[in-house]
Amino acid sequence: MDHPGKAFYRLSRLKPGDELPMRKLPAAKVYANPLETQALPLPRLEGGAPLWRVLARLSPRLPEVGSSLSLAEVSQILMVLAARGSAALAQKEGGRLYPSAGGAYPLEAYLVVQEVQGVFPGVYHYFPKEHQLFQIASRPDFSRLKAALLDLPLEKAAALLVLTLVPERSAALFGLRGYRYALLEAGYAAGLVLVAATGLGVSAYPAETFYDEEVGQILGLKEGEYPGLAILLGR
């Protein structure tokens, strides 16, 4: 029997003559009755550190100080995930700041807040169209979450940003190959988050290794949505 990874790449290959499903995209995820709705301040679209100086400092860094982040800093970081048509970006064009094959956007984002000024601790879903946080659960079991992250120093992080994947959105257009595109999209978005955090002087550490089911349960994910990457944010 093939290794699962090898089987996946073999089954998702595209050959001449193959046809893609190109079905209708599933609807975007929206929480109708969040516990709280947290409006985010409008992010800056100009100014800030020059790009090349930011890239020279770019490297994964674990939070060490354990201090909080401001809501403005959180807004600036999440801006890279916002929809272009949102008030956060003040543009009419659709789409987001990162590419998505077929415009499927299989990516979702959750912020587990621990120490963000003016924000209750809890689990929040990020709504890119409105650039808002919807609280979907109160304070989670942080010790359980730390164990799920293989004991990374979560207690020193102000927040944990989890990027999740809903591959069926991409698979509706591209079949099994859509799973590749969903993984690529998580990489595009994570790269922008790291650049934004570095430009703000915020520590950001991507945790690619974690217990998937544990993280999914803490976030309340349903079948068909999977955690792809977790990023610790702090000082």
Image: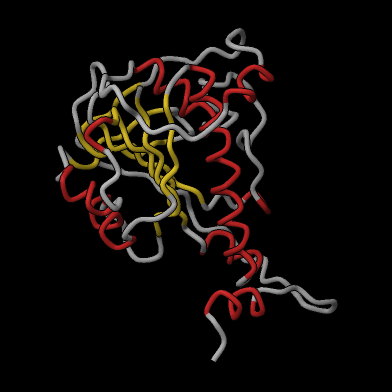
Q: Is residue 15 above or below residue 126?
A: below
Q: Is residue 13 above or below residue 232?
A: below
Image-based side of 133 in relation to 144, left or right: right
Give x and y (percent) for residue 206.
45, 42
Image-based side of 99 in relation to 39, left or right: right
**Residue at horizontal 19%, vertical 26%?**
120
Q: Indicate how the structure is coloured in the image.
A: secondary structure
Q: Is residue 220 above or below residue 73?
A: below
Give x and y (percent) for residue 68.
27, 19
The C terminus: image quadrant? top left
Which one is in front, 63 or 108? 63
In the orientation shown, which residue stands out farthest toward the top? 47
Give x and y (percent) for residue 42.
46, 15
**Residue at horizontal 50%, vertical 49%?**
107
Q: Is residue 90 above or below residue 203?
A: above
Displayed quadrant of residue 177 = bottom right
The N terminus: image quadrant? bottom right
In the orientation shown, which residue stands out farthest toward the right? 16
Displayed quadrant of residue 225 = bottom left
Which one is in front, 44 or 194? 194
Image-based side of 160 in relation to 108, left or right: left
The tally of labels here is: 0
Give x and y (percent) for residue 184.
61, 53
**Residue at horizontal 27%, vertical 38%?**
153
**Residue at horizontal 57%, vertical 47%?**
187
